[in-house]
Amino acid sequence: MDSDGTPDARGTHANPVPRPAGPPDVPSVPPRPGRAPRPVEQGGPAVGSVAEWLDEPRPDARPGIWRYGYRVPKGAQAAERLSPVTVVGLLVPLVVGLVLWSVWLRGAMPYQWVLLKVFTPEDWWWGGTVAPKGWEGSAAVLVFNGVFFLALLYGMGRLGSWPDIARHFVGRRPQPARALLAVLGALVTLGFVFPDAFPGVGWDALPIVDAVVALVALISGGFDVFGSTVFTVGLYTVITLLVVWPFARIGGWLAYAKERLAARRAAAGPTGPAPADRPRAHWPDLREAGQYEAAELLTAEVTGGRMNDVDCARVEHAWALARRDGLLAAFRDTVLRQGAAAWAHPSGARDLSRRTAHHDLAAGQVRIGRWVAAERAPLAYHGAGAALGPEVLGTSLLAVGPSGAGKTRHLIEPVTESLALRALTGQCAFAAVSAPGTPVAADSAFDVVVRIGDRDSVHDLDPYADSDDPDEAAAFLAEALVGDLDTVGTESAATALAQVLGPYRAAYGRFPALPVLRELLESDPAALSALRDALAGDESTVMRRELDVRIRQAASPADVGRVVADRLSLLNRPVFDGFFGGGGAARPFSLRSLTQHPLRVRVDLPEHGHEEAARLITRLVLAQFSAVVRDGRRPHFACLVLDDATGTVTAGSVRRIQRMRSQNAGVVLALRTIGDVPEALHGPLYGAVGCRMAFSGVTTWDGSRFAQAWGTAWVETRDVAKHTVFADQPMTRAIHALRKLVTGKAVTTDAVTVRTVERERWSASELAHEVPPGHAVLSLTTVEGEHAPPLLVNLRG
């Protein structure tokens, strides 16, 4: 896409890829929470007001929470952060501290007796005349009293976790309530420090001021420093600031004051109200940056119903890029020239022809269900919507569930639809690999549709991913061909392939078609002789040496080239004739285009009867995707969605999936059972992905893997035991006998034992038998490292 907003006309390969015509410009927004979804058909009416959708608040929430219209439950933080143990930890040190302070004041401690005996007012050379009025007792006693009180206060605070409690009750509250609570705490504390300043309080002062004054008098060496009013007032001011400083930090007074001053300064300026006070539909960020004309035009487009949610998200993304790169003038010119159609997708589409899920493009989320308000779920998740976005898909997602559990309907299709919408905004490029016979979404939702084995397919799949490096091409070809075999190593297969691909490219300037590659790997004499004759020049000495090594290895009975050729024969069937660069009518498509354009790609695997070939193609797509996403930095998110990842996961792919989160890319893997992955890779696969999803109906063997990945948690258990009461007194025994005669039960007493034990978050048995149909257990991890525990989600909610 050009900087001036014109669509990029470059293709996805050597030959340009034609773009499908987009649907009509239909303003559309997601439905309000609680309202039934209405799909946007082609030419249908708008779902709702775009201005209302833009202005809807989206507060920060835990991972996986649908933020559109979300309201944080009251008491959510208190339920999660504060416990009865914390309250006891607050009160017990307070009681102990009061007892110790009372004993200290009564002079009951031996070293205090000595202190009072030695240090008396008349013992000091200044004769007590320097101390301020009302100062009673020795200076040393006052200093020691203050030091002991501060040490006691610090110890009580540490033992009672007072800073954590203060942050819980005050620090997490929004302004100005947080500042007001801190002011109240500061006034109460100052009332104890300076009781004379608060008439009628009737309590004694805390031993802070007198101790500081005594210490200053002791350091002054007899000079009458308290005769100066300025010094006395300054000293008391310093004490006041030291007392108020912790409350200022907790209440955030400085930040709040800066915020209020900035708002007042902006309100007094010529631009009118502050940008934060304007609704989002009026584009306050643009106005704040001085782009008033562009903001007015976009506001008119929104209020006039000429912009949908895709347009708004696309323009906001373009604004973020323009502000980052300093292209504000180009942004303004493009908006004034093209309006709502600025920075349109190269296909010209501004929406999908039909939506089946709830989408919020402002937050980049798609709603897949509702979190169940179970006992183990945090209060913030109770009744909230469950959503997925690029911040969690960037850590990759593994979904396991039997056929019919709803993996495609409740997960793959909504995620694919969300990625397609984000691609229209220029923020995403993705490829979806459909299971045989079940294409994901309609053809109009994609820019490129590759139908392997279909003669009517417009596009073909490039087996070399438009690579010019023989070693790279050999690596992901070897991964696809022998990655699922235990008898042949991927490295040795890649070496055999590179020994053929390198010389062929040096001789002909391109890689061979798959039938020719198979002949070379099988050591066909005619093919090898023709290739060696084409490398007759002196500049091909190295490549001739590579080919000679391949010819010598082919004579060995343990040659891996024949095994690779046998696996390659799965793609040399008549149904695939003309595909994979074989010179057919379909034009080859390279997955490397995903790193250059916000493309929407779907690969349809061949129908039933070619299951092994379908798995080989899926491994090839995954290997190519993980190889191309490493190249350079992309301005958009790249994702690969595999509707059926059976036989796809290999040791190399697991390592590459783990590195994708730092490459702004992710993979969605759907499996019927974890048994479709080699057992040695179960643990590495669960560790490589950040999001794990167990659908209803999983077996206990599959559930055990999830239970191990999710680990354990500390829970509080209550054990109640009934003990028979044996009375010693005759009257009591008679009453118990009468009670047993009437009720038929012996007199017992309950013994309650409360313990904290470590248990699995979800056991294998619970996952196999207690997850209702239409539900799943989902855990999420964002690319920043924030976690959401495994919780039950209702996929039909």
Image (cartoon, helix red, strand yellow):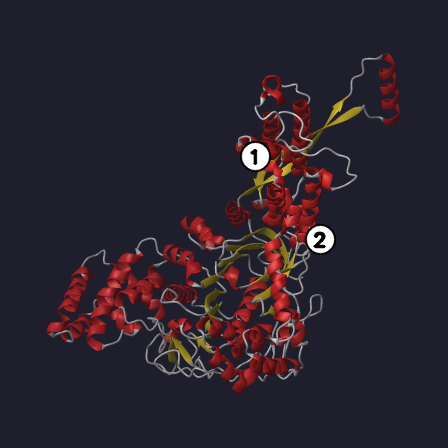
Disc sitting over residue 74 in the figure: 2
Amino acid under disc 2: Lys
Q: Residues within 10 Å of mark 1 (few under 14, many from 20)?
A: some
Dot 2 or dot 1, earlier in sequence: 2
- Relative to residue 561, is residue 706 drawn left or right? right
- Which quarter of the image is occupied by the C terminus? bottom right
Q: Can residue 30 be seen in this view?
A: no
- From the viewer's side, name the closer residue of 758 and 363: 363
Q: Quadrant of residue 742?
A: top right
- From the viewer's side, name the closer residue of 563 and 582: 582
Q: Name the residue under label 1.
A: 216
**Residue 652 place in picture, x, y as percent:** 36, 57
Q: In which quarter of the image is residue 199?
A: top right
Q: Residues within 10 Å of mark 2 (few under 14, many from 20)?
A: few
Q: Quadrant of residue 660?
A: bottom left
**Residue 291 place in picture, x, y as percent:** 55, 78
**Residue 774 place in picture, x, y as percent:** 64, 59
Mark 2 vs mark 1, CA separation in Å:
49 Å
